[in-house]
Image: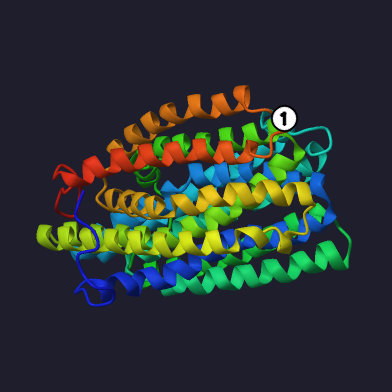
Amino acid sequence: MPRVLSAAPFRHAHDREIFSLAVPTFFALVSEPLMLLVDTAVVGRLGTATLGGLAVASQVLLTLAGLCVFLAYGTTAAVARKYGAGDIPGGLRDGVQGLWLALLVGIGLGVGGWVAAPLLVEALGASENVAPPAITYLRISLISTPALLLILAGTGVLRGLQDARTPLVVAVGSNVINAGLCALFVLGLGWGIAGAAWATVAAQGAGAAVYLAIVLRAAGRQGVSVRPVWAGIQRAATAGFALLLRTASLRIVLLVTTAVAARLGDAQIAAHHVAMQIWSLLVFAMDAIAIAGQAIIGRYLGASDVPGTRAATRRMLEWGVMLGLVFGVLVFAVSPWAAVPFGVDPAVAQLLTGALLVVAIMQPLSGVVMVLDGILMGAGDQRYLAWASLWTMIAYLPCAAAVLWLVPEWADWSLTALWAAFGVWMVARGLTLGVRAHGDAWMVTGAHR
């Protein structure tokens, strides 16, 4: 793995291009978990069971969206390569077909998820009190699945074209809509957890409409057809298959962790949900550098600039470590009071404090893992990422099972033990990604990998 922390902050030659993409992406990505944090803060005032229902339903929704993240990540890498090679119309053609793929997949997942909602909630171990609000939130939110996937595909196109500001504007606007409507529907109109779900549907629908207008207008200026082409849709799906396998392994880890927390007790699943949202907020923040890496590395490799690829990789890793250290200190400092904004009971607050201590310790490693993941994705090294994710998932599952079988439910440290097991998974990811980045096999140059 490249040596880190070799240059002073803000004085490296690659800092400007990194931050021109990473800073807007940071705020855009932070806005995504903030949408769930807003729902969590509002719904938390409806009781522990309702908050637990939001936790379970959110994991299902995040899994469905996560499995389709190739619509953003794969498109970013492909468009960035063609951008580096000077073929912008070719990148937009791929992007338009990605939008059609997103629409088709979104409709299928939305319908299938609505039918299977009770089974999905049951599979995550929701109790009799948690299951009804979970099903309500899940079924309403699934209406916006096509819009969510269109947002993913549209974001990938723009980032591949080195435009991170437009996704920021769209994300902030969507979250303002969500926050206002969530407070109105849940607290003002008394719609309960259903109000939070309807707010999300409205916000994501507005975001999707904006992306469609922007991408289709750009395609028109470049003379690119916006009609669906089956061969193009099939290529987009085939290119994303390895990323789908990679993401499936990651989502299985998160789902298993949620399922274990749910089986430990209602207080544990409620505290776990808050801890996971805070962890996701920090991960998304560091993922800003990873996504900048997708666009930057794709562009350098498309232009056949291997030295530039190495130098940018090293600098992004340095920033991943530095941000991880800062976030770790912040989480440790606020952990005793982290439960206050969510209005949870004392038992949940105590469990949350212990889990956040583990979250704080993991942050520097998380920075390295997120950056390396984005760099290899930008290089189009999806096949290795798929296999690496599979093996790290296999390493984690026995650790999660050990927590469920060996840790008593009544133990104050039960959730802390689960998050420690989660840390084992992060260590395994760091090892597999670091070994790959140290070599040269991932650096394939040219407009096509």
Quadrant of residue 88 within the rendered picture: bottom left
Residue at the top extreme of this rendering? 405
Is residue 90 something that shows in the picture?
A: no
Q: Position of residue 169 (x, y in %)?
A: 51, 74
The amino acid type of the residue labelled 1 equals Glu
Which residue is depicted at the point 83% across and 32% down?
128
Is residue 348 something that shows in the picture?
A: yes
Q: Where is residue 307 in the image (x, y as percent from the top left)?
A: 10, 60
Which residue is labeled 1 in the image? Answer: 122
Which residue is depicted at the point 24% across and 57% down?
298
Q: Looking at the image, which is closer to me, 227 or 118? A: 118
Q: Looking at the image, which is closer to me, 148 or 382? A: 382
Q: In this rendering, is residue 158 above or below 259?
A: below
Q: Position of residue 284 (x, y in %)?
A: 48, 58
Q: Is residue 128 left or right of residue 306?
A: right
Residue at the right extreme of this rendering? 190
Q: Where is residue 218 in the image (x, y as percent from the top left)?
A: 39, 70
Q: In this view, does 168 lie to the left or right of 3?
A: right
Which residue is depicted at the point 27% across and 48% down?
376
- Helix, strand or loop at disc 1? helix
